[in-house]
Image: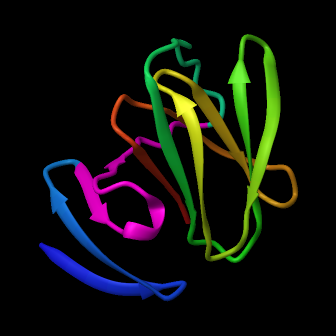
Amino acid sequence: MADMFTRNKVAVLLLTVGTCLFFTAASHGQKYWTSLKIHPPTARLPEQGGAATKIRFVNNSKQELTYYWCHGLKMELYGRVPAGGGVTQDTYAGHIWLVRGTMGRALGKCVATTLPGLAVFR
């Protein structure tokens, strides 16, 4: 199944293959992205360190989101994702990221993988 859409003046081709979502968009510097599972905010996930990779946070909601790198018992604010926008972040495979809405409500966690990952929040 393939869908074509335009967002922020960039044409993106989406192909769904099994449980992975891949897309091509030259403006993001990566040819293929794999969809990341969004875990509940309270999920305990094992933290690991691995190879350098990227994670793209996509915000399909009407509110600004903030994302945090979780390491040990600490959370470090790394950036914001505007409503309807997306941000690409350098990271390492195994790193855990938490995303919050404008009122500080935790929306979910995701873990970076060896392949560049796409984390979509609605």
Above or below — where is 110 with respect to 28? above
- Span of residues in magenta: 20-40
Give the percent coordinates (x, y) of residue 3.
23, 80
Q: Quadrant of the N terminus?
A: bottom left
Identified at 58% across, 18% down, the residue is 44
Direction from residue 20 to residue 78 in the image, left or right: right
Direction from residue 4 to residue 59 in the image, left or right: right
Rendered image quadrant of residue 41: top right
Residue 23 covered by magenta stretch: yes
Direction from residue 53 to residue 82 in the image, left or right: right
Above or below — where is 22 with respect to 78? below
Give the percent coordinates (x, y) of residue 111.
50, 31
Q: Nearer the viewer, residue 88 or 4?
A: 88
Above or below — where is 103 with respect to 12? above
Above or below — where is 103 with respect to 36? below
Residue 58 covered by magenta stretch: no
Q: Nearer the viewer, residue 54 or 62?
A: 54
Direction from residue 86 to residue 117 in the image, left or right: left
Identified at 59% across, 27% down, the residue is 96
Identified at 13% across, 50% down, the residue is 18
